[in-house]
Image: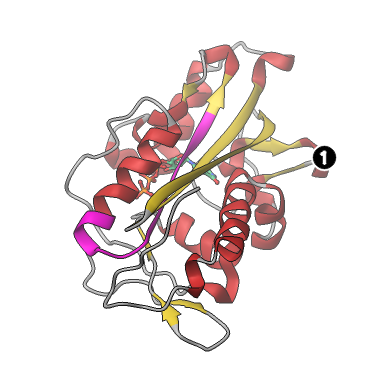
Amino acid sequence: MSKEVGRGFHDSTMRSVRILLATTNQGKITELKHIMGEQLEIIGLGDRTEEIETGLTFEANALLKARHYHRVSQLPTIADDSGLEVEALDWAPGVYSARYADPGTGDAGRIARLLDEMKGLVGQRRNARFTCAAAIVWAGGEKVFLDRVQGVVLESGRGANGFGYDPIFLYEPLGKTFAELTATEKSEVSHRGRAFRRLAAWLNESRLLDTPRSGDRIVATAD
Ligand code: ITT
């Protein structure tokens, strides 16, 4: 893990609370900087060696990641577990979205595998959704927010923005794939934007951020 961790969330007296974002995914880091804005200085983890996404749901995996790095860092820790789900494939790739093809093949390999699995599927059988679980774990408790966005898997990719499965995910209300949206447009409608805006709103309401620092530990109560 990087020795540096996120530092941000200034309250009205400009005390700051450090929050760690536990992700190794550069695409997520870029988007979360956008979504959380000035509130949070986000530092990614770098490489991760341990396999800690052993859960069967997005919520379980987001909490596993956040709990693990909270234990390591003793800081309030945010983690995202997300993925693409295709109903006609029994919701695959789902929580296995990042592990859907050989690690060396990257996003292109995962897209190729998915398009292959979906060969012959037409119309509503190409419906899909992105899901994101945004978890926060701190000394006093934990919370997780889940949100989704519906779309359609195209037969070939369009656009160069974003990451992961974005080029093949058509967001019908805008008639564009996620890879054809700007970062602002994507965060307004995406699973991650929706889940993390709810987490950010809860953080602001919860008074967790107003808690003065006591060393690196924050004492607060989950509702
Ligand atoms: P961390 O666990 O370190 O955060 P990861 O990439 O392994 O990074 P996940 O286990 O949550 O993260 O897997 C998410 C995968 O789902 C990601 O690698 C993409 O393939 C896909 N995905 C999630 N959100 C996406 C998005 O907004 N656009 C495109 N693909 C996305």
Q: Which residue is mark 1?
A: 173
Q: Is residue 140 left or right of residue 82?
A: left
Q: Splitting the image into four quadrants, where does ligand 1 fall?
A: top left
Residue visible at 33% across and 55% down in the picture: 24
Viewer-proximal residue among 116 and 200 = 200
Q: Residue furthest bottom?
A: 13
Residue visible at 41% across and 30% down in the picture: 95
Residue 195, above or below 96: below
Task: Tell me the quarter of the picture where residue 153 sits.
Answer: top right
Q: Residue furthest left?
A: 49
Residue 21 seen from this side? yes
Viewer-proximal residue among 125 and 117 = 125
Residue visible at 59% across and 56% down in the picture: 202
On the image, the x and y values in percent for residue 187 come to: 65, 55
Residue visible at 55% across and 17% down in the picture: 118
Q: Is residue 155 left or right of residue 220?
A: right
Residue 185, above or below 83: below
On the image, the x and y values in percent for residue 66 come to: 34, 50
Three-letter amino acid code at the position of disc 1:
Pro
Residue 77 on the magenta span = yes
Coloration mode: secondary structure
On the image, the x and y values in percent for residue 176 come to: 75, 44
Viewer-proximal residue among 15 and 99 = 15
Residue 75 on the magenta span = yes
**SS of the residue at dot 1?**
helix
Task: Tell me the quarter of the picture where residue 188 sits.
Answer: bottom right
On the image, the x and y values in percent for residue 52 come to: 24, 40
Categorize mark 1 by other alpha carbons within 10 Å: few (<14), some (14-19), many (20+).
few
The answer to whether mark 1 is within 8 Å of ligand 1 is no
Q: Which residues are magenta?
A: 70-84
**Quadrant holding the N terminus:** bottom left
